[in-house]
Amino acid sequence: MLKSLGFATGFLIISAGNSLLAETVVKEEPAMGAMREGEVLLVDDGSCPPGQIKRVVGGNHTSVGGTKQILRTRSCVRR
C-alpha cells in the first residue's frame, strides 16, 4: 500500500514539474503590452530557419504601459 502511494505521489510531482517547463506555442506574436514580464512563448510564424522556432520573452517597457525599461526579446531556437 505504501509503495503504491509513494509511486503515485512521485508521478504527480514529476507530471506537475513537466507542465511547468512547457512553453506555449502560438501562430503569431501577441501585440505589444499583451505579454507579462518574463512570460515565454514559442511563435510558429515561419520567420525562423527550418527546424527552429521563434522564442519570445515578454518585457515591461514604459512605451506600452509598463513600469520598467525591459524590452521584449526574440530569438530562434531549435524545436
Image (tube, helix red, strand yellow):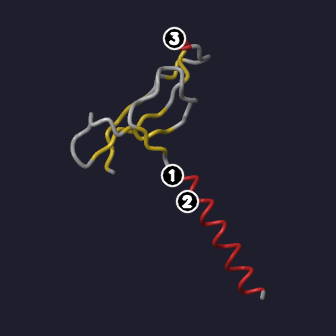
* Spot occupied by residue 52 in the image (x, y as percentages of width and height): 28, 45
Q: Residue at x 67, y 79 (%)?
A: 7
Left or right of 18? Residue 57 is left
Q: Which residue is mark 3?
A: 63
Seen as rendered, the residue at the extreme top is: 63
Left or right of 78? Residue 6 is right
Mark 1 and mark 3: Cα distance apart in space: 29 Å
Mark 2 and mark 1: Cα distance apart in space: 7 Å
* Spot occupied by residue 26 in the image (x, y as percentages of width and height): 43, 39
Q: Is residue 76 above or below residue 35?
A: below
Q: Residues within 10 Å of mark 2 (few under 14, many from 20)?
A: few
**Callout count:** 3
Q: Are marks 2 and 1 in contact (CB under 8 Å)?
A: yes
Q: Which residue is mark 1?
A: 22
Q: Which residue is mark 2?
A: 18
Q: Is residue 23 above or below residue 18?
A: above
